[in-house]
Image (tube, rainbow, N blue to C red):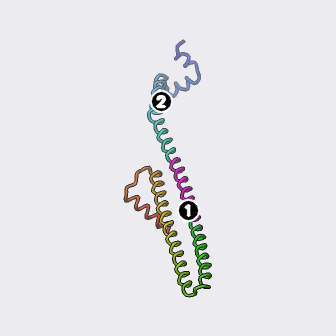
Amino acid sequence: MTVLNILAANPISEIAEQFGVDWWKLLSQVISFSLVAYVLAKYAYDPILNVLAERRQKIEEGLRNAEETKKQLANAQQQASELLAKAGTDAQKIIDDAKISAKAIIDRESARATTEAEQIVAKAHEATVREHQKMLGDLKREVARLVINTTTKVTGKTLNDEDQKRLSEEATKELAA
């Protein structure tokens, strides 16, 4: 019995014959489709999936880096706040010491003590202002550096001097606000 005789006895083959199905052509089309599907899967679909997986990984890495930078920025801001609080405490201690010294000197030399106390207070204030300005400058530079590093990592490109300057200025404006 041949394949055609076996197919002819089958009710499915009878229906297929009524619709004009040529089994050899159908088989050749199935084989052709399978070959095309295999070639596409091997040389197009898998490489595209690999590229998408790499991109997804880079995006996740960028997000992790951004989160780490955000934590570093928060840590830097906390340290700056602590330094400012310490500077304020130190300044207050210096001011308190100056007042105690001024009282002792007033008892001995009223006129001279007044002048010296004012000078001490002025110096303490200037030192506090200088320390505050220095810490703000350090904070601005650190934030600008973190912004530039984050931007470089997230975008995946090296920033030129103009881009770095612009980002630094924007970060400084944000801190000033």
How packed mark 2 is, by other alpha carbons closer than 10 Å (few <14, some 14-19, many 20 or more), is few
Residue at 43% x, 64% y: name it.
169
Residue at the far top: name it: 1
Q: How many labels does the image show?
A: 2
Q: Nearer the viewer, residue 85 or 56?
A: 85
- Please give the range of residues in magenta: 59-82
Residue at 58% x, 77% y: name it.
98
Q: Distance between the residues labelled 1 and 2?
A: 57 Å
- Can residue 66 be found in the magenta stretch? yes
- Mark 1 vs 2, N-terminal side: 2
Q: Nearer the viewer, residue 62 or 120?
A: 120
Task: Residue type at mark 1: give it.
Answer: Gln
Q: In this view, does 32 lie to the left or right of 114?
A: left
Residue at 49% x, 46% y: name it.
58
Q: Is the magenta stretch mostly helix, strand or loop?
A: helix
Q: What element carries label 1?
A: helix
**In the rendered image of this protein, does residue 139 appear above or below residue 93?**
above
Choose top left, top right, bottom left or bottom right for residue 83: bottom right
Q: Nearer the viewer, mark 1 or mark 2?
A: 1
Task: Give percent across and percent down for residue 11.
Answer: 59, 23
Q: Which of 128 and 175 is in front in this view?
A: 128
Task: Residue type at mark 2: give it.
Answer: Tyr
**In the rendered image of this protein, does residue 40 appear above or below residue 143?**
above
Residue 38 numbered tag: 2
Q: Mark 1 points at which residue?
A: 77
Task: Give percent across and percent down for residue 89.
Answer: 60, 70
**In the rendered image of this protein, does residue 10 appear above or below residue 47?**
above
Task: Give percent across and percent down for residue 138.
Answer: 48, 63
- Can residue 1 be found in the magenta stretch? no
Q: Quadrant of the N terminus?
A: top right
Q: What element carries label 2?
A: helix
